[in-house]
Image (spheres, rainbow, N blue to C red):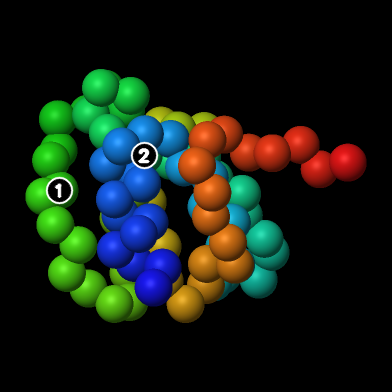
Amino acid sequence: MIGQDLFDALRKGVVTVEFTKLDTGELRVMPCTLNNEISGQQLDIKSYNTNDTMVMYGLDVNAWRDVKIDTIQKWYPGYPQDKE
């Protein structure tokens, strides 16, 4: 299940989420986190309790973003991997 596993990883550190943007249909590759020490934010999301949307802090845009779970293609710990 994407939701809880992704939520747990986001709380621990940096995660790259690859998802399809709803407005353009393009693939978005976003390094993000829910870890306050990494983001410099003070919001503490304590639990994951939805199956459709997840809030995360986009490190490349320095802003909060909400991502629909069903648009996520893949996610992995760390910053974006180089595409060779």
Q: Is residue 43 left or right of residue 66?
A: left
Badge number at residue 55: none
Q: Residue at x 54, y 49 (%)?
A: 76
Q: Around disc 1, counting alpha carbons within 10 Å, would you say few (fewer than 14), some (14 to 19), or many (20 or more)? A: few
**Kind of element beneath mark 1:** loop
Q: Quadrant of the C terminus?
A: top right
Front-most of residues 38 and 24: 38
Q: Is residue 62 left or right of residue 75?
A: left
Q: Using the rendered view, name the quadrant where residue 25 is placed.
A: bottom right
- The amino acid at mark 1 is Ile
Residue 40 in percent (x, y) is at: 26, 22
Q: Using the rendered view, name the quadrant where residue 6 is placed.
A: bottom left
Q: Residue at x 33, y 24 (%)?
A: 38
Decide if residue 64 is in sight here. Answer: no
Residue 31 in percent (x, y) is at: 51, 39
Residue 63 in percent (x, y) is at: 37, 38
Q: Is residue 61 positioned above or below 69 on the image?
A: above
**Where does label 2 land, which residue?**
33
Q: Is residue 72 positioned above or below 28 on the image?
A: below
Q: Residue at x 22, y 73 (%)?
A: 50
Q: Residue at x 52, y 35 (%)?
A: 78
Q: Is residue 65 positioned above or below 4 on the image?
A: above
Q: Is residue 61 left or right of residue 35?
A: right
Q: Is residue 75 positioned above or below 42 on the image?
A: below
Instruction: Name the residue at the right extreme.
Output: 84
Front-most of residues 43 and 17: 17
Q: Is residue 33 left or right of residue 77?
A: left
**Where does label 1 land, which residue?**
45
**Kind of element beneath mark 2:** strand
- The amino acid at mark 2 is Thr
Q: Using the rendered view, name the quadrant where residue 39 is placed.
A: top left
